[in-house]
Amino acid sequence: MINFGFIAPGFLSLDTEEIPGNAGMADQVEALRWVQKFIKYFGGDKDKVTIVGESAGAASVGFLLLAPQSKEEGLFRNAIAESGSMLADWAVDRNSTKHGYVIAELAGCPLEPYADLLHCLRSVDVKTLRDAQYYFSTNDTLNGGLGFGGQSPIIQTTGKVRYLTDEPRKLIESGNYHTEAHLMFGANEGEGIMALDMTLNLYIRPNDLENDTNFWKYDAVRVVMGALGIRDDTKYLGYAVDSCQIGNFTVMIPGLVDIAGTLFLKAGGWQTVLLHTKYNPHAYWYSFDFLGKVSLIGADEILPRGVMHAEEIMYLFTMPIPHNETEKELGKKND
């Protein structure tokens, strides 16, 4: 079992042969090749490898499912994705070249000539590069963006070796991927609490909009959905939040939580499972609905308490939770 996520410097792209993007996926594929080669020495079976990921890690699981290397080499048998999917809009950076040049400039690299830019990016301190990406991300969220640019997989058009060759949905609908894999995707009941909390603290409050009635009446749904990478071209999502109470943030919260959770994190995984069953019946969906006493992430007090993003992780892995509350809830004895 290997848990995968995104690492920001590993997905910087300039859409050139030297910096084509998806270096992070290359690392993941190499890790799986290592497992195939050496797992027998640890008592494992190379034909029963399971990859697991949560959130961005869940999207990584999906991208590995679509990577041609997985199909050609049989790198894993089972895939578990918790609260995320490669079919979510936020999972793919569709403006990677623009984001890459902005981050490079923030890192102090000359943008031209290209040879100097390339040399700088290859030699710059990794902390400097990471700080540049963080600054870019912070500014993006303040301007209503999601802040994921420059740190997500891309659809490759350059590079000798390519890991994502087309739109994720197109690949999975075509069946041109690792269809032999057994899948389990799922999500938590209150995923949207974290999504709305992000928008509240990274955009709404920094821009002094929390008590702006006009904002909540005319712009909020478009801005919140846009910040989460969710399109509302028909305006039906806005009406669904609460057509009678638009303008009252407190009343709008439950609707915003439900829509954000569904479209930001749940829908992509659900669609992945449905599409995969066309080629392989071993595809399952789970829903985690247990509301425990302890929250792993937490959210602003103005938002409702629920089964938030990442809550299931406490019950899967040993974590430094105060007073071993998760163990008590599961009925485990303390040593």
Image: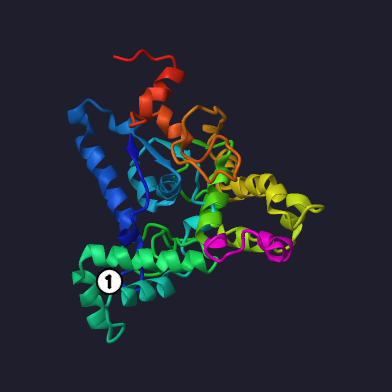
SS at mark 1? loop
* 74 sits left or right of 223 in the view: left
Q: Quadrant of the N terminus?
A: top left
Q: Residue at x 59, y 45 (%)?
A: 302
Q: Residue furthest right?
A: 244
Q: Residue at x 28, y 33 (%)?
A: 46
* 188 sits left or right of 34 in the view: right
Tell me where residue 59 appears, x and y as whole percent: 45, 48
Would you call the spot at circle 1 few (<14 residues within 10 Å), some (14-19), or many (20 or more)? few
Position of residue 317 relative to residue 138, above or below, is above
Q: How is the image coloured?
A: rainbow
Tell me where residue 151 appears, x and y as whole percent: 39, 61
Residue identifier under label 1: 18
Q: Quadrant of residue 135?
A: bottom left
Q: Which residues are magenta?
A: 203-221
Position of residue 193 relative to residue 18, above or below, is above
* 126 sits left or right of 4 in the view: left
Q: Is residue 277 magenta?
A: no
Closer to the camera in the image, 222 or 46: 222
Closer to the camera in the image, 148 or 42: 148
Q: Residue at x 42, y 34 (%)?
A: 313
Closer to the camera in the image, 159 or 300: 300
Tell me where residue 292 appears, x and y as whole percent: 51, 27
Number of numbered markers: 1
Q: Quadrant of the C terminus?
A: top left
